[in-house]
Amino acid sequence: MQQNIDEIDLGALILVPFMGAIALGTITLGVDVFGGFNFTDLIWSGSGVELSWAALITVLGITWIVATNELDGSNYEQWEYGVIVVMFALVPAYILIPPVADFINSSDIASFFSSLGLSAATIYISWAE
């Protein structure tokens, strides 16, 4: 069985690690064109939940990778489903659960490894199926 990264996933594979790192607060990026834009700008805020562009792009990118793998006929093992669930849950948990955000923001190392884990899981899921 030959395993390689699907070409259809390339856009998401570039965006998810980058936007995921922004959504988790590991890096920041602002664009000073047309009045300024920051990927941490809020799309929606309510009930203590703040949804940013980076978080939305991250979740949509992960959804794209998993959906295209399903269309190709995936055959995930049980532990790979666990990787997918953690990958999907990391950014929403960061947004919705304050102790998760507190832990990730507690140190640069926690933030870095959270972003690294999200990136590695994204690339693995694209490559494995």
Image (tube, grey):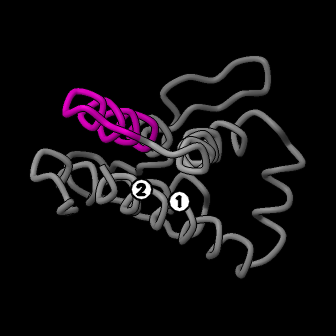
Instruction: Reply above or below: 68 against 114.
Output: above
Predominant SS of the magenta segment: helix
Kindly state the secondary structure of the residue where label 2 is placed: helix
Please give the range of residues in magenta.
Answer: 57-75
Who is closer to the viewer here, 89 or 108?
89
Who is closer to the viewer here, 75 or 126?
75
Q: Farthest residue to the left: give it.
A: 7
Q: Farthest residue to the front: give it.
A: 1
Residue occupied by mark 1: 118
Q: Farthest residue to the right: give it.
A: 99
Kind of residue at badge 2: Thr
Kindly state the secondary structure of the residue where label 1 is placed: helix
Q: Residue at x 41, y 54 (%)?
A: 19
Q: CA distance from mark 1 to mark 2?
A: 6 Å
- Neighbourhood count class around disc 2 (C-alpha, 10 Å): few under 14, some 14–19, many 20 upward: many
Who is closer to the viewer here, 57 or 51?
57
The numbered disc on residue 122 is 2
